[in-house]
């Protein structure tokens, strides 16, 4: 005999489901990182994130109109490589980043990290990068809500700040995306408005 709910109880259940900000069927979860998770920016740019080959690695592909940045990140935070693609064809030499800390620390609220970073690619440069991890907050993308840890990073050369970034780290996916970039002359804000699993 099929199970039936009294009318008033069924209506209450349906109302509760409709009011839920992040339904499991609609909002991606960590397991979706195998095929990928897609974030859409207000400008129309798309970021797709997937698990990388190395333990804890995330590969992020960001851009639109055939121009893409492919970024590899350790723990979803520390950049290890940036490559550019134009219509699927590599452009230029990838930049690779090595750190004087091993292993790199896993993200955690309140964590402070400072590292000497060597960048090799079209040119070689050395900088000091600092990471300040904030306290968790709840962040919403459309109807999906997640815990988020803000991270402020600073890049310094010869003791002078070259640039500053704010990253948004999502423990659910083990990934951080760029939310703000500033270099003294410009400040760019990246606002993501929706998230979905790649099917």
Image: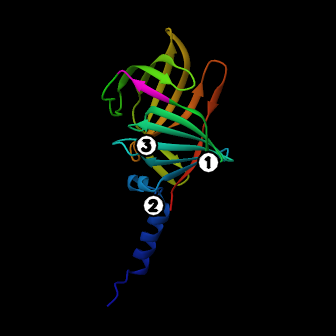
**Residue 98 shown in magenta:** yes
- Residue 112 lies, in percent from the top left, at 37, 23
The vertical placement of 58 against 4, above or below, is above
For this view, does 190 lie left or right of residue 106?
right
- Residue at screen point 50% across, 24% down: 120
Spatial distance from mark 3 to mark 2, Cα to Cα?
A: 25 Å
The vertical placement of 115 against 5, above or below, is above
Residue located beneath label 1 in the image: 88
- Residue at screen point 48% across, 37% down: 168
Q: Main secondary structure of the magenta part?
A: strand
Residue 184 position by quadrant: top right
Residue located beneath label 2 in the image: 23
Q: Secondary structure at mark 3?
A: strand
- Residue 144 lies, in percent from the top left, at 49, 53
Residue located beneath label 3 in the image: 58
Precedes in sequence: disc 1 or disc 2: 2
Spatial distance from mark 3 to mark 1, Cα to Cα?
A: 19 Å
The answer to which of 6 and 124 lies nearer the viewer is 124
Write down the region rendered in magenta.
96-100
């Amino acid at each position: 005999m099929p199970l039936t709910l009294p009318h008033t109880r069924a209506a209450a259940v349906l109302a509760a489901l409709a009011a839920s900000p992040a339904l499991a069927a609609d909002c991606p979860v960590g397991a979706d990182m195998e095929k990928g998770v897609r974030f859409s920016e207000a400008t129309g740019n798309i970021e797709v994130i997937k698990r990388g080959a190395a333990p804890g690695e995330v590969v992020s592909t960001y851009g639109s109109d055939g121009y893409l940045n492919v970024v590899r990140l350790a723990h979803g935070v520390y950049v290890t490589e940036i490559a550019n693609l134009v219509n699927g064809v590599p452009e230029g030499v990838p930049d690779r980043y090595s750190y004087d800390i091993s292993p790199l620390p896993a993200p955690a609220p309140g964590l402070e990290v400072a590292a000497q970073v060597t960048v090799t690619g079209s040119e070689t440069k050395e900088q000091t990068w600092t990471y300040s991890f904030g306290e968790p907050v709840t962040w919403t993308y459309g109807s999906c809500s997640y815990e988020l840890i803000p991270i402020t990073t600073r890049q310094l050369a010869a003791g002078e700040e070259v640039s500053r970034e704010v990253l948004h780290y999502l423990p659910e996916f083990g990934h951080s995306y760029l939310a703000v970039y500033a270099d003294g002359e410009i400040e760019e804000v990246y606002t993501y408005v929706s998230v979905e699993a790649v099917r």
